[in-house]
Image (cartoon, helix red, strand yellow):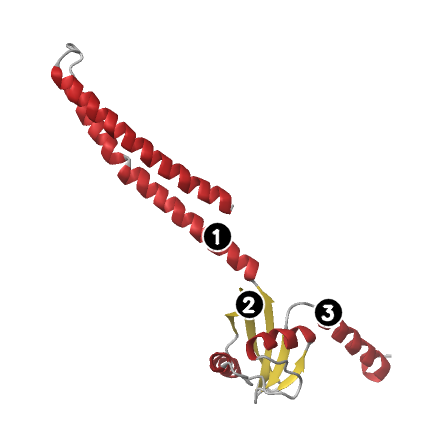
Amino acid sequence: MTHKNNPEKVFADERNLRMLINNTDDPIWLVDADCTIIECYNSFKSWVKCFIGRELDKGDNVLFNGANKAYQDQSEMCYRLALNGKAFRSVEDMKIDDETRYTTVTFNPVFDHNYKITGVSCFARDITEQRKHLLKIEEQNAALREIAFIESHKVRAPVATILGLEQFFNYDDLSEPGNKEIMQSIARLTHELDAIIQQVVLKSNEIDQDS
C-alpha cells in the first residue's frame, strides 16, 4: 500500500517531520507570493522576534516590521528578489542582550509544476562564532602587518646607520677621538632598537592573547 492510499501514514510522516524541524535551532519558514507565512517553525518565531519585538506565525505577513522599518525595507527587497527568481544569501545582524549576533539567511524561490514562482523558502543559520573568528583573524593580520612595517622601516633605519658608522670606526687606532663619537652614536641607536624590539614583542603578545 502506498503512502497516498494510507492517510494515517502520511499524517504520521508529516507529524514526525514537523517535530524534527521544530527541534532544530535554525529558523526555517515558507511564504507565498504575497509574503504571507504559510509555514514556519518555533526557531523562526523566536528569531524574528529579535527584529520586530513579537513572534510571527502562519497567516502573518512576513514583512510586518513592528518598530523596525529598516528590517522591513531590507526584508522586502530580499523577498522581491527571490520572487523574481533569484536564489541568494544575505547576512543579518541583531542585538541580543547587548551582543551583536550574525545570521546568514538563504532565500530560494519556490516553483510549481508549471515552473511558476509561488513563494519563497527561507533558511537561517547563526554564524556569530564564525564571524568572530574571522574578525579575530583580521585583527591578527593587521597586527602582523604592523609588525612587518616596524621591522622593515623602523628597524632598518638605525641598523643602516650603525652599518654606516662602522665603516668610519678606526680599528687600527682605538684611541682616535672619532671612535668615541661613533660608539656613543651606536649606543644611542642600540637603545632605539631595543625600544623598537619591545614594541614588536608587545604586538606579538597581543596576538598570542587573542589566539
Judging depth in this view, the residue of 130 and 55 nearest the camera is 55
Under mark 1, the amino acid is Lys
Residue 26 x/y as whole percent: 64, 68
At a point 25% along the width and 25% down the height, the residue shown is 187
Q: What is the x, y in percent for residue 75?
A: 51, 80
Mark 3, secondary structure of its residue: loop
**Residue that protrudes farthest toward the left in the picture:** 177
Please state which amino acid type lies under the numbered disc 2: Thr
Q: Position of residue 162 (x, y in %)?
A: 22, 27
Regarding mark 1 in the picture, which secondary structure is present there? helix
Label 3 crowd bin: few (<14), some (14–19), many (20+), radius 10 Å: few
Which residue is denoted by mark 3 in the rendering? 23
**Residue under numbered circle 2:** 103
Q: Mark 3 or mark 1: which comes first in sequence?
A: 3
Specify whether 184 is left or right of 95.
left
Indicate the amino acid at tag 3. Asn
At x 27%, y 40%, the residue is: 153
Task: Give the position of the N terminus as an image quadrant.
Answer: bottom right
- Does the rendering let one see residue 106? yes
* x, y percent for residue 186: 23, 25
Most foreground residue, 144 or 121: 144
Q: Image check: 204 left or right of 44?
A: left
Sequence-earlier tag: 2 or 1: 2
In the drawing, does residue 162 fall left or right of residue 28? left
Residue 6 can be seen, yes or no: no
Residue at 83% x, 77% y is 12
Q: Could you give the CA–CA distance between mark 2 and mark 1, rounded to whole angstroms?
A: 18 Å
- Whole-angstrom CA distance, mark 2 to mark 3, is 18 Å
Position above or below: 36 against 108: below
Question: Which residue lies at the image location 75% right of the left edge and 70% below the top edge?
Answer: 20
Going from the N terminus, do you reach mark 2 or mark 3 first? 3
Which numbered disc covers residue 136?
Answer: 1
